[in-house]
Image (cartoon, rainbow, N blue to C red):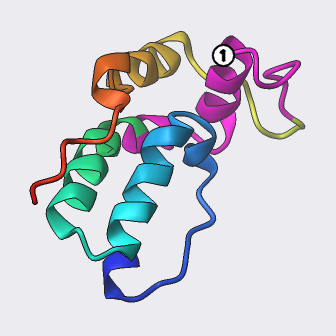
Amino acid sequence: MLLMDARGAIAASAHLCTGRFAALVAAAAAGRVEEAREHAEALLALVLALFAEPSPAVLKAMLHEAGRIATPALRMPLQAASAAGVERARRSAPSRSSARAPARAR
């Protein structure tokens, strides 16, 4: 959407890997399509894993694990994320080394 002139995003998943999401938005806004695509592709598995179970269970579990929120607790009728769902999200997160913006071709 950003590459089709959207002005931003409201993305709950951007609370994890925030720098990578910010780099994606900056690259898209500057028209650096390939760079934006690299960021989007690196983040896609994480986004899919975060929302594979009822939202926001996995996201809240990951935010709690990262120390970003005090508790992963959800209000009824939602239930806590499964251990398998959280593990899938952990494995899907881009590695720290890939979190840096890709080198820009000039």
- What quarter of the picture does the C terminus occupy? bottom left
Asked whether 69 or 56 is in front, the reply is: 69
Residue 72 location (% of width, % of height): 78, 22
Residue depicted at 39% across the width and 20% down the height: 88
Residue depicted at 63% across the width and 45% down the height: 55
- Seen in the picture, residue 68 relative to 47 is either above or below; the reply is above
Q: Is residue 87 left or right of residue 7?
A: left
Residue 95 location (% of width, % of height): 33, 19
- Seen in the picture, residue 73 relative to 56 is either above or below; the reply is above
Residue 39 location (% of width, % of height): 29, 48
Q: Is residue 79 left or right of residue 16?
A: right
Q: Is residue 79 left or right of residue 93?
A: right
Asked whether 79 or 103 is in front, the reply is: 103
Residue depicted at 14% across the width and 61% down the height: 34
- The residue wearing badge 1 is 66
> For the image shown, how many numbered marks are present on the structure?
1
Q: Amino acid at mark 1?
A: Ala
In the picture as drawn, the residue positioned furthest to the left comes out as 105
Specify whether residue 1 is in view.
no
Specify whether residue 5 is in view.
yes
For the magenta stretch, what is the residue range? 47-74
